[in-house]
Amino acid sequence: MNIVLLGAPGAGKGTQASMLVEKYGMCHISTGDILRAAVKNQTPLGVKAKAFMDAGDLVPDELIIDLMKERMQEPDTEKGVLLDGFPRTTAQAEALDTMLAGLERPLDAALLIDVDFDVIIKRLTSRRMCRECGYIGTAADEKCPKCAGEMYQRDDDNEATVRNRLDVYEKSTAPLIGYYKDADKLITIDGDRDPQVVLADVEKALNL
C-alpha cells in the first residue's frame, strides 16, 4: 500500500506514521528525517537545505525530488511506502505520480491529518527532542524518558518560525488537498484527539 500523509507541521503525521510502521511493518519515508540526516552529515544536499530549513521555508522541489527518486529505488520500498513530508507542492505530487507509474506502484490514498493552527502552535512551541535517540516529548520532559538523554528545542520550533512554517504550508502545501481530492484519493481524519483514537480512524479509512 502506498500512502501520502498530509497535514500541517505538528499535526501528528509522524506519530501516526510511527504507529502504522510498528503495527503493519510499512516503510516510512520522512523527508524531514532524511534532510536532517543530510544536514548533520554536511552532505552537499544538506548544506544547501540547511538555510531553507532554518528559516522555516520549503526546500526547493528539485532537491527534494532528486532525493526521493534515489530513496524510492531502495529494496525496502517494494512492499509499499508511507510518505511523510513528500509531496509538499503540486509539482512534487506530479513528480511522485510519474515516479510511482514508472515503478508500477500506484498511490492508494492521500491521508490528511487535520488540526487547527492554534492547536499546532501550542504543540510545536512546547515540543522537545532528545539529542541522543530522537525521542519527541514536551517541555515537561527534563530528560529523555527513553534513554535519559538531553532534551532540546529544535531551531524550527520557536513561535516565529512555526508561524512562518504554517504560512508556507497554507500557501504552498494546502493546494495538495485539492489535487488529491480531484484525484479521488483524499481521506480526511480529525487529528485533534488522542493518537490512538486517530489511529483507529486511520485504520478504518484504509481498510487495514
Image: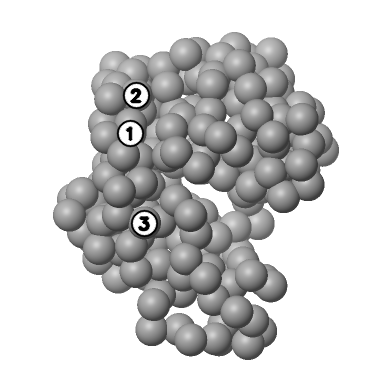
What element does badge 1 sit on?
Answer: helix
Closer to the camera, 145 or 41?
41
* Residue 20 to residue 63: above or below: below
Instruction: Write the residue at 44% across / 38% down.
Output: 55
Disc 3: which residue: 158
Mark 2 Cα-neighbour bin, 10 Å: few <14, some 14–19, many ≥20: some
From mark 2 to mark 1, how far is it between C-alphas?
Answer: 5 Å
Report which quarter residue 121 is drawn in. Answer: bottom left
Disc 2: which residue: 172
Q: Looking at numbered disc 3 in the image, what kind of residue is underneath it?
A: Asn
90 horizontally vs 3: left or right: left
Report which quarter residue 88 is drawn in. Answer: top left
* Residue 152 to residue 208: above or below: below
Of labels 2 and 3, earlier in sequence is 3
Position of residue 29 measured from the top left corner of the image (x, y, whole percent)? 62, 43
- Residues at circles 2 and 1 in contact by the CB criterion of under 8 Å: yes
Disc 1: which residue: 169
Front tag of 1 and 3: 3
137 horizontally vs 134: left or right: left
